[in-house]
Image (cartoon, rainbow, N blue to C red):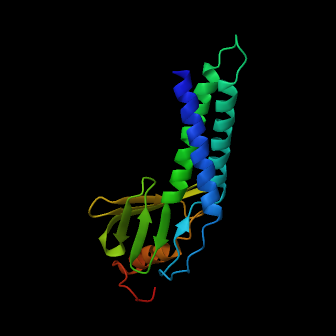
Amino acid sequence: MGIIVKFLLIALVAVLVIGMVMRMFRRPTAPQNTGPRQQRMPLFVPLIGWLLLITGLGLALAGFSARPGTDPMPMRIGAVVSLILGLLVLLMHRNRYVQPDADGVRFRTFLGREKTIAYRDVTAYRVTEAGWRSHLRLRAADGTRMQVNPAVYDMSPVLAAIRFKERTGRWPSPGEPR
């Protein structure tokens, strides 16, 4: 069993190194104008993910090169947990984005599912502030829900549409001044 785990760890390290080298030498593509900018998570999120991955690799190497007579199982378990958490954090950063537009909000969940909430389809909204944290929650008629922190993402088009709705009693049409 130990030889299989060692082989899998060596294969994982090789795949990660090959992937990083390929990413460094990839030619950048021409920028595409896709409309409003997609907002991703802050930069510290992937840094935490890479730190967890590196910690997991270090624990894995230490767990499989432990002195005879010591129990390497806790280090191996810690390595697996750290590697999985690091991969999940990196996947979460890669998948998640928010793109507020003039007529709705497009977003992608942590699992990579793209969703759209048009302002006219919003059945419930709530902006809460608790101390230093604020949350914007939207719910569409089809059951789609979104929750973001407006301090992290620029949600000014959504907040302007909410203010318009509170003033006039209806959601704004695309292109209508707010």
Residue 176 place in picture, x, y as percent? 40, 89
Question: In this rendering, would 113 be left or right of 69?
Answer: left
Where, by quadrant of the figure, is residue 85 drawn?
top right
Report the front residue among 60 and 100.
60
Q: Residue at x 60, y 74 (%)?
A: 28
Residue 13 place in picture, x, y as percent? 61, 42
Toward the left, the furthest residue is 142
Report the front residue among 88 and 7.
7
Q: Residue at x 60, y 48 (%)?
A: 16
Question: In this rendering, would 138 be left or right of 159?
Answer: left
The answer to whether 132 is drawn above or below residue 63 in the figure is below
Residue 66 place in picture, x, y as percent? 70, 21
Count of residue discs: 0
Residue 6 place in picture, x, y as percent? 58, 29
Toward the right, the furthest residue is 67
Q: Is residue 63 visible?
A: yes
The answer to whether 35 is drawn above or below residue 97 in the figure is below
Report the front residue among 105 and 141.
105
The answer to whether 114 is drawn above or below residue 87 in the figure is below
Q: Is residue 132 visible?
A: no
